[in-house]
Amino acid sequence: MGKIIFMANEESSSTPGVSTGGAPPRGASIRGSWKIGEFAGIGVYIHATFLILVAWVLFVYWHAGHTVKGMLTGLLFTLALFACVVLHEFGHAFAARHYGIGTRDITLLPIGGVSRLERIPDQPKQEFYVAVMGPVVSIAIAVVLYAAFRISGGVMPPVEALSSWTATSFVARLIYANAILAVFNLLPAFPMDGGRIFRALLARFMPSQKATRIAAGVGHAMAVLFAVLGLFMNPFLILIALFIWMGASQEATMAQMKSTLEGVSARHMMITNFASLSPDDPLERAVELILHGSQQDFPIVKNGRLVGMLSNKDLLHGLSQRGAESPISQAMRQDCPVLAATDDLQTAMEKLQSSNCHVMPVVDRGELVGLFTSENLAEFVMVQSALNNRRAPRPDAQAGDERRSA
């Protein structure tokens, strides 16, 4: 199973998934993950919770009375399946790259893989192809394995044999597993690939935000169905239901955020009341400003030119390593992206997420004019959402007001 996610904010975008999707910084993966490799410039990570799946597989085989060899065979099958999941994710990643969209990383979790794309495809056609390539890869794997299996003289067992995985051959199980993976991910509900395909098809006939609401609604309905089935069949379906519900809600929130950010520039929400420091100032000067104000991050300016940023984290590190008398130039960072005042908020959000900075300087014709922060962005979205959700007066209430005024 796999999932595509888009970089809206660092934590909320990292919901684990059943299908999976400036250059992103190296090592900036989902928290608690370890890098196990890299291909085509895309890092592949394994989340710490994946070890729970390993332990569970070994326990299930042990509890069923299998020998150590049988337990290891079961574990090997699980790892082979997740290798196929990685290929599924690269199907998304390469399709996205074709449209100029980078993939930040791919992470394996107990319930599937997660591809983190830098942004949402601009057109429904692009999203359709990016989403569909994952299941296409899974189907291709099943077809290739099936052809090799038959050529070698293997006989595919009936579907009924899947009730006892150990009664079927290793390759046959892998063929069925990839077919199931493809079919499951084509379910028309967020956050599976089928949900994105469904949304892309709807978006050809209606506004994208409305298409997202419909697809998210289908996802919620399917989550309820899975939860009910889980109560009577397999409790694991309840976990899948929870995942689908959270993913559908996340997609709806992201679509609303994207709509809110359209047409708004950094100039409209940047902080204009701020203090700046010189690279020659001692770190204790920054400490004074923090203690006597609310600003935590400072632009560093020399001769009217922006030369760096000093974050609260950089300040504390500089104090502990060099002392309060050391110059700011030894603690500041120079890798924070710079926004133009005319940049739209979608661009600002993407730059914010592709860096390790949560405050970015805003310039206009080379002059520092403000600061753009993740907190201000979140507050802006909340305010706009509240305004958009404001209920209009009911027709009967309006009629009553008119009668009273008459």
Image (tube, rainbow, N blue to C red):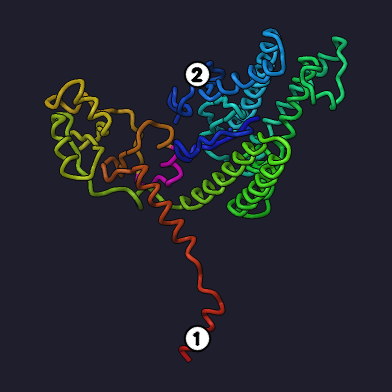
Q: Taking the image as drawn, is residue 129 in sight?
A: no
Inspect the magenta stretch and tell me whether residue 349 lies in it.
yes
Q: Is residue 346 left or right of residue 207?
A: left
Residue placed furthest toward the bottom: 406
**In the image, residue 386 lies at what x, y percent?**
44, 59
Q: Amino acid at mark 2?
A: Lys
Mark 2 to mark 1: distance in Å? 67 Å
Residue placed furthest toward the top: 69
Relative depth, front residue between 378 and 249: 249
Q: Is residue 196 above or below residue 203?
A: above
Category of crowding for the residue at label 2, using alpha-carbon neighbours closer than 10 angstroms: few (below 14), some (14–19), many (at least 20): some
Q: Residue at x 54, y 33 (%)?
A: 117
**In the image, residue 181 lies at what x, y percent?**
71, 29
Relative depth, front residue between 223 and 370: 223
Residue 136's tag is: none
Q: Which residues are magenta?
A: 341-350
Q: Is residue 120 left or right of residue 199?
A: left
Residue holding disc 1: 402
Query: SS of the residue at dot 2?
Result: strand
Residue holding disc 2: 35
Q: Residue at x 59, y 32 (%)?
A: 96
Relative depth, front residue between 60 and 133: 60
Residue 327 lies in what quarter of the image? top left
Q: Residue at x 46, y 56 (%)?
A: 385
> Mark 2–mark 1 contact, CB under 8 Å?
no
Q: Is residue 382 left or right of residue 20?
A: left
Q: Which SS does the magenta portion mostly show? A: helix
- In primary-sequence order, the first of circles 2 and 1 is 2
Q: Is residue 394 above or below residue 175?
A: below
Q: Taking the image as drawn, is residue 204 in sight?
A: yes
